[in-house]
Image (cartoon, rainbow, N blue to C red):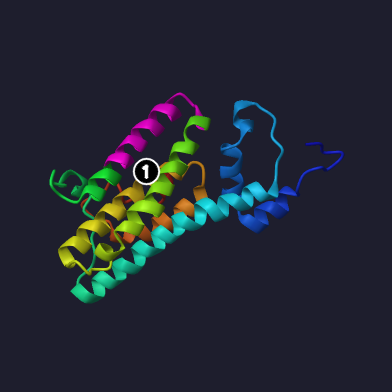
Amino acid sequence: MSKSKKNYPDPLFIAKQYGADACRLYLCNSPVVRAEPLQFKELGVKGVVKDIFLPWYNAYRFLIQNISRYEQECGKNFVYDSKMRYKLEENGNLMDRWIVSASMNLIKLVRHEMDSYKLYNVVRPLLSFLEQLTNWYVRLNRIRMKGEEGFEEQERSLNILFDVLLSTTTLMACITPFLTEHIYQNLRNGISDKDKDLLQESIHFL
C-alpha cells in the first residue's frame, strides 16, 4: 500500500461502511500481524461481517428471543446458572457436553497464546469455535431451546448457550470491543447478583 498512490480503500469509508470492529478483526487475522505483506481489500472486511459477525449475532439474537419466550411461558425471569457447565451428567445431552468442552479448550488456548502475545494464533481458533457454535450447536438444538421438549430442557440448553456465548464474547472483547460491549450489556441482565465477578460495568473489566 502506498500513501502517495492511494492504492487502497479509504480507511474512514471502510470503518463507516462496515464498522471499526470488522476492520480490527480483518487486520488481526491477516499476515500483517506476523510482519508479512498485506493487500488490504474491502472484500475481506465485508467477509468478516458476513461470515463471522452475522452468524455470531444471530446466535445471540436467537438466545435472547428464546429467553423471552421462556419467560413468557414460565412466568418467571431467566437467570443464568454459571455452575450449569459443571452439572452436566455423563449420560446427559451429548451436544451440551461437546460445546462446553470446546469452550473450555478455547479459553485455555486463548489464555496461553495471549500470555505469549501471539495474537495471530488466537483469531483462527476463535473463528472456528464460532462456526461450530452457530452452524452446529444452535442448529441442532433449536427444538430444545424453543421449549418443545419441556421447560427443564429449554432452561438447560439456554443456560449452556448463554454460557458459551458469554465466554466467547469475553474472549473476543480485546479484538472487537464495540460489538462485544453491546452484547454484554444485554447479557448481564440475565446474570444473578450472586455472580459478582461476571457483573461489571463493562465487558472489558472481565
Range of residues picked out in magenta? 101-119
Question: Identity of the amino acid at label 1?
Answer: Leu
Q: Decide: is 105 above or below 116.
A: below
- The residue drawn where x is 81% and y is 36% is 2
Residue 68: say if magenta. Answer: no
Q: Name the image quarter holding the C terminus.
A: top left
Give the class, few, some or many, for how many residues have Cα within 10 Å of label 1's Cα (few <14, many ≥20): few
Residue 75 in view: no
Where is residue 147? Give x, y as percent.
23, 68
Q: Is residue 136 above or below residue 33?
A: below
Tell me which residue sits at (40%, 63%) in the image.
Answer: 61
Expressed as whole percent of the image width and height from the top left, the position of residue 105 reads 32, 35
* Left or right: where 173 falls relative to 199: right
Please say whether residue 7 is visible from this viewpoint.
Answer: yes
- Identify which residue is drawn at 51% across, 51% down: 52
Write down the residue under mark 1.
206
Which quadrant of the rendered structure holds the N terminus?
top right
Q: SS class of the residue under badge 1?
A: loop
Taking the spot 40% from the left edge, 43% from the top edge, the residue there is 129
Between 157 and 78, the one nearer to me in the picture: 157
